[in-house]
């Protein structure tokens, strides 16, 4: 094994080897870092975040049951989670190679399709609740 591979492995063990409260604090820090990065680099996430702010505010103001309110909020919040995964897939694909490849396109298109399904879920959920 090359020296740099061993160094990378040692570093990974140090990072992953944390336990207890230290692991929780590290994980929280990584999560905040991921949110900062997605805000900075992904316009789609910022747009979805704005949509979430608006729709969650509307959901809180609507005269619906608690369960319906939760469903309205969960449906829009899921779009942010899906966009995080989609952005992560795109970053990994781009890290591997920026050249055009059918498998790269397939991975990115599938991530985009997941977001489309999430948005359809929002539309269906909101229509069913608002029209009932």
Image: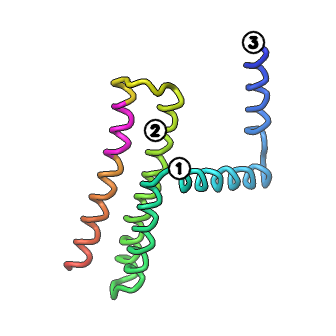
Left or right: 65 as drawn, with respect to 94: left
Q: How many labels does the image show?
A: 3
Q: Residue at x 77, y 20 (%)?
A: 6
Left or right: 125 as drawn, with respect to 83: left
> In front here: 39 or 112?
39
Residue with the mark numbered 2: 90
Residue with the mark numbered 1: 41
Which image quadrant for residue 126?
bottom left
Please give the label number shown on residue 31.
Answer: none
Q: Using the image, determine if residue 129 lies above or below residue 31.
A: below
Element assignment for label 2: helix
Q: Give the range drawn in magenta.
A: 105-113
Camera-near label (2 vs 3) is: 2
What predominant SS class does the magenta segment belong to? helix
Residue with the mark numbered 3: 2
Element assignment for label 1: helix
Position in image of residue 93 (x %, y %): 47, 31
First-in-chain label (2 vs 1): 1
Please report contact status of discs 2 and 3: CB closer than 8 Å, yes or no.
no
Q: Which residue lies furthest to the left in this view?
A: 131
Position in image of residue 78 (x %, y %): 42, 59
Mark-to-mark CA distance, 2 and 1? 12 Å
First-in-chain label (3 vs 1): 3
> In front here: 77 or 87?
87
Q: Residue at x 41, y 61 (%)?
A: 48
Position in image of residue 31 (x %, y %): 63, 53
Q: In which quarter of the image is the N terminus?
A: top right
Mark-to-mark CA distance, 3 and 1? 34 Å
Element assignment for label 3: loop
């Amino acid at each position: 094994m090359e020296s740099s591979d061993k160094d990378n492995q040692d570093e990974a063990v140090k990072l992953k080897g944390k336990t207890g409260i230290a692991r929780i604090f590290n994980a929280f820090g990584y999560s905040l870092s991921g949110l900062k990065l997605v805000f900075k680099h992904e316009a789609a996430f910022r747009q979805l975040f704005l949509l979430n702010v608006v729709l969650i505010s509307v959901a809180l103001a609507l005269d619906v049951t608690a369960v319906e309110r939760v469903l309205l909020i969960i449906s829009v919040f899921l779009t942010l989670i899906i966009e995080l995964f989609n952005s992560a897939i795109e970053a990994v694909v781009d890290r591997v190679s920026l050249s055009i490849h059918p498998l790269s396109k397939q991975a990115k298109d599938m991530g985009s399709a997941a977001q489309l399904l999430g948005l359809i879920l929002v539309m269906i959920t909101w229509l069913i609740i608002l029209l009932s």
